[in-house]
Amino acid sequence: MSDFFLELFSEEIPSSLQKNLREDLLKSFNILFDQKVISFKKSTSYSTPNRLIILFEGLKKQIVMKSEEIKGPNINAPEVALEGFLRSNDLSKKDLFKKKTDKGEFYFFKTKSKKINTHDLLEESVPLLLQKIQWKKSMKWGGFALNWGRPLKSILAVFDKKKLIFDFHHLASSNSTFIDKEYEEKKKIFTNFKEYNNFFKKINIIIDQEQRKNLIEKKFSEISNKKNIKIENNPKLLDEVVDLTDQPNVILCEFDRKFLNIPKEILIITMQYHQKYFPTFDKKGNITNEFLVVTNKKDIKGLIKLGNERVVEARLSDAEFFWQKDKSQNLVKRVSKLKLMNYFKGLGTYFDKVQRMRKLGGMLSDELLISKEKVELSASICKVDLISELVGEFPELQGIMGGYFADAQGFEKDVSLAIREQYLPTGFNSKTPKKPYSIALSLADKIDTLVGFFGINQKPTSSKDPFALRRLALGIIKTIIENKKDFKIRDLISYSTSLYLDQGFKFENEFLQKELINFLMDRLKFYMKDEKIRYDIIQASTNSFNLDQSVVIFSKAKSLNNFIDKPNGTDLISVYKRASSILDSEFKGNKLDLSNTTDPGIFKTELEKNLFKKINELRKYFQSINKDENFEQSLTNLADSKKVVFDFFDNVTVNDEDPAIKKNRLDLIQMLCKTFDNYVNFSLIDSQ
């Protein structure tokens, strides 16, 4: 058994590309070895900013390719097809034999079993696999034809302690690599990964990204305990700094306490997104003036600490200047400046958008029973922060800064909060607005955007969604479901469309409203699927109600999903399926004209009367419930009908000789099924 070890040395590859490269290349080799039936004990991939390493342990030095039958053309195929098959496989006609299959008689030939050296296979396959790498972003450099994430400098390839010899574009493989990424002067030969890993460990370079991550987390913990501060969990940023270092070290830095007077979001954005630093918090969750920097070297002279503190100080000084300037700018007076800021081609300016949002928000205020004037005020000033210098510098803070500006200028708290939360929710795990004014502004913004983009046919197509409209639609669904508050969405879409037309905009999509309603229903189904609701239950519930009843759809589906695998759930489905299967068999090939009522005057048995009584009890129950339906109780009531229903089916012949009796009993069964369908369309539920 031998090891295969590959290192690709390049200029620094961004963190965003490293993980995909590690995983994709390792997967490619795994597929190759699976196809060639080459077993191994373990496969791993590692990366540093400059190095990508693939390691396979316990590979066989030699594999035996078993003989196999290769199918050729049909025996009745044109002669040219047969000649092409012979030529491509370097065969003569005497090498072939005929064999019958399910699809006819074909020519076949049988390959000979042969031994292949793994070393030879790798020399042939490695450059082919490297050529297939798909980069999200790549570059060419010099006069070379190679497209790579960053300039590729060397390829180290070793199997069984011997170098693999192949060419990849302008590079020739070897068993050596650069040991100093900065100067690229010294190279060293390695015959196996253990020797390679130990060498770099001695010079404090950690090849394994998981070991680097553990080291950073350990140092975070030590500093946190020593200084009595908390470090916010940020897996994405942690993974990024892990991939940006190969000699990680953590430094505690600080900035002037005066900057704590500006909004904490500015501090966090500056440190996390712009500088890749980790802000810290006290035990009460308040941000402190200390932050952690993951560097790639030890800071022996303290110069790295000083440099990072100066960078943060400069950025926060700018932010403080913008904050002081922008918060004093009157929001209401600046609304007219939105006329100079285009929203989207064909949809006007941001001033046009906020005028539409004002009216749409007013309609929403009626459903939420809140002040129309306050909703309209919130909508009028909600986009003004887009023309502030602070949001120009920190675009991630749009909306958030508008809320701070409104606070600073004395607007009511629920108005400021609505502005701050207008873009929420931004994804599955995002916070959802809970306060009525926030809900109104968030929905008005999203509905206006969706109507506009669907109107000008800028809709998502297959996997492409450049304007994140699926996320917006999901945000509407999340807001409705998680607040347990249904809205007349169809009317809102219709009204929003008319607001665009009133402003003089013309929509080329005449099916806009229908398409958008279907689009939102698809997002509701997607949301339910993510909640682990069965597909058939999703179909049954969405088939029974419209988009204006999204909360009802979700709640009924969720309750049924939790109920269906319990004993009562089994009873529920068995009752409906037994009844519906009788109707299906009678309707099949027959033209029965059933009514929606049954005549109790011609009942011949007590069992018919009992079933009729039970159906009426259920119907009265469904007629009595309003918006306060207890879904668990509804399902239990339906399931409790099992004994009466089964007594009827077990002892009463539905297919009576008297056509009137038969029709009356079928009417009774149809009444039962329709009563069940008051909950959802049970005909779409799979019986399991």
Image: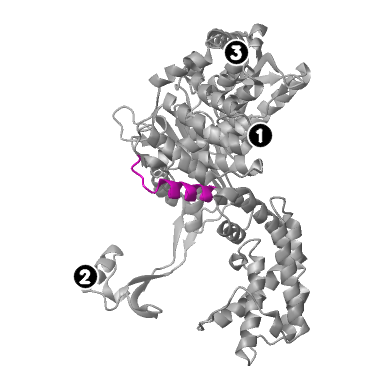
CA neighbours of label 3 inside 10 A, class few (<14), some (14 to 19), many (20+): some
In the rendered structure, the answer to whether residue 83 lies left or right of residue 223 reads left
CA neighbours of label 2 inside 10 A, class few (<14), some (14 to 19), many (20+): few
Quickly name the residue at label 2.
80
Q: Is residue 686 above or below residue 376?
A: below
From the top left corner, tell me how far across and down residue 10 is, in percent. 44, 30
For the point 78% across and 18% down, the residue is 228
Q: CA distance from mark 2 to mark 1?
A: 72 Å
Q: Are marks 3 and 1 in contact (CB under 8 Å)?
A: no
From the top left corner, tell me how far across and down residue 681 is, in percent. 60, 64
Q: Which mark is residue 453?
A: none
Q: Note whether residue 243 is visible.
A: yes
Looking at numbered disc 3 in the image, what kind of residue is underneath it? Gln
Q: Is residue 42 above or below residue 670?
A: above
The residues colored magenta run 507-523
Q: Residue furthest bottom?
A: 657
Q: Quadrant of residue 132?
A: top left
Looking at numbered disc 1 in the image, what kind of residue is underneath it? Lys
Of residues 162 and 668, the one drawn nearer to the viewer in this rendering: 668
Q: Is residue 510 magenta?
A: yes
- Counting residues from the start of the chain, the first of labels 2 and 1 encountered is 2
Quickly name the residue at label 1.
434
**Quick one: quadrant of the C terminus?**
bottom right
